[in-house]
Image (tube, rainbow, N blue to C red):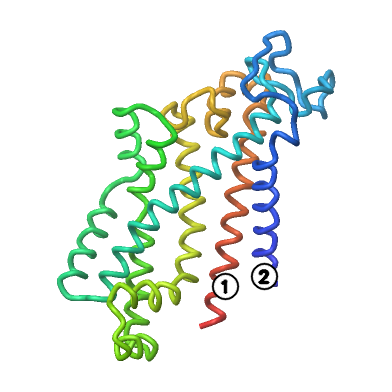
Amino acid sequence: MKKAGLYLGIAILGLITLAAIFAPLLTSHDPYAQNLDIRLSVPFWMEGANPDHLLGTDQLGRDYLARLLYGARVSLIIGVLTVIVSGVIGITMGILGGFFGGRVDDVVLFLITTRLAIPVVLVALAVVGLLGSSAVLVVLVLGLLLWDRFAVVARSTTMQVRGLDYVSAAWAAGCSTPRILISEVLPNILSHLAVVATLEMALAILLEAALSFLGLGVPPPLPSWGLMIAEGRDFMFFSAWVIWIPGIALFVLVLAINLLGDGLRDLVGDSR
């Protein structure tokens, strides 16, 4: 039963990833093509639906299924790239602090404490608002703001393994410090960091959607799910599906990532 959530998360995330990758094969419509003659066409389960547009069209007549599929690409790419940026920063700092201790660890703890005192959403809003919205800027801003969990987990797990036999054996064999950190310490703490990566990816996707909803994330006409929700809010009382279709998609994606993270956490806990 413990692994049921893990398998469900993998299945849902895998389906969404495949849908994003093979979006051109799943729909023949261009997510950017506009046709005002068919604007706000209803989805297939509603009366008067257009059979050529299964999920209807938005306020500019763009196919909603196409924008949903291509929007999955935007969310996944931003989530993965943000995890890579924040992971490199946080894991490097955590391993150095946990392995060397002393003043190095003091500096790392100071940086972690300083980062925790910074409100992520407000800083992201301020930076993106000043520098302008772009996918690259969103990734960099989120990556530079979401490294603290990686640092905390990497530091604590490194402190646990630095005194173990295989590390001592590497020292005795004359291995250099960088080689010990990369070849001995890092592989043995990756399971814990993988759990953190899933949590940070889900958070990054939600923050990107929030920024896009406020008009400070991915710039239009890119089909971001947050931007789709923002564009449909003026029609939510008469065409509510333009809000809840991307909203449900965002919920399912974040749920799948969290299920995957919970499953990995249970596996890591059972293996200890």
Find the distance from the CA under tag 2 to the CA under tag 1.
Answer: 8 Å
| Residue for point 51% across, 58% down | 198
Left or right placement of residue 123 versus residue 18 in this view: left
At 30% from the left and 34% from the top, the residue drawn is 127
> Which residue appears at 67% of the width and 70% of the height?
3
Name which quarter of the figure residue 121 lies in. Answer: top left
Q: Residue 236: x percent and y percent?
A: 62, 23
The x, y position of residue 249, in whole percent, is 64, 40
Relative to residue 57, is residue 103 depicted above or below? below
Q: Which amino acid does the dot numbered 2 rest on? A: Lys
Q: Secondary structure at mark 1?
A: helix
Q: Residues within 10 Å of mark 2 (few under 14, many from 20)?
A: some
Counting residues from the N terminus, which is met first, the one under dot 2 or under dot 1? 2
Which residue is denoted by mark 1 in the rendering? 266
Residue 2 x, y percent position in the rendering: 66, 72
Mark number displayed over residue 3:
2
- Name the kind of residue labelled 1 in the image: Asp
